[in-house]
Amino acid sequence: MVSIVQYGERHFDGTDMLWREAFPNDAPWNAAHISIAEKLRFQPNLLLVAIEADQVVGSIMAGYDGHRGWISRIAVLQSHRQKGIGEALIQEAERRLASLGCVKINLQVVVSNSAVLAFYRKCGYEVEERVSMSKLLPKR
């Protein structure tokens, strides 16, 4: 049985392994030791992991800025996909965001990972015509 819980330090190694499997070509600033430390400073209750038999099998990171919610870092171990874990993670993140007053949630999909679009559509998300822009800030 899989349970969805708030991330705790005991989940670091499993989450790190999961992210390395799910995001093998990720940018260095998205590494678990950086991303998790930063997320724990802001809304730590929105960093969730899926646990089965004391093993991290999935994760999701959400955030709310008072205007809209965001979902990122959703991942499920390849060995545990197609079992409803991703949907359960999305549902719990949505529940927590809604409890904060959030009425709209956004997420981004990298073009090279467009295969996940069907998964997000199954969860009720739609493609919106937008241009995503970013800027790297100098290190502090």
Image: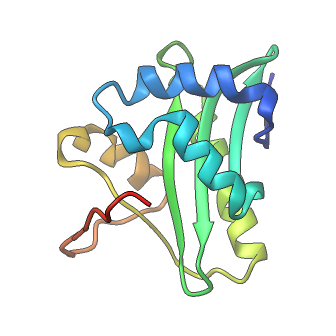
* Residue 99 x %, y %: 78, 74
Determine the image quadrant of residue 20: top left
Residue sitting at the far front: 140
Query: Horizontal and vertical percent for residue 82?
Result: 51, 25
- In the image, residue 118 above or below residue 67: above
Q: Is residue 59 visible?
A: yes
Against 21, residue 116 (above or below) is below
Residue found at the very far bottom of the displayed protein: 67
Residue 83: which quarter of the image? top right
The residue at 32%/62% (across/down) is 138
Image position of 131 (left or right of 100): left
Q: Position of residue 61 (x, y in %)?
A: 59, 51
Nearer the observer, 101 or 28: 28
Tell which of 54 and 80 is nearer to you: 54
Image mark count: 0
Residue found at x 57% / y 35%: 33
121 vs 134, left or right, is: right
Residue 119 higher or lower than 64, as above or below? above
Q: Determine whether, in the image, residue 53 is placed left or right of residue 24.
A: right
43 to the left or right of 117: right
Is residue 3 visible in the rendered image? The answer is: no
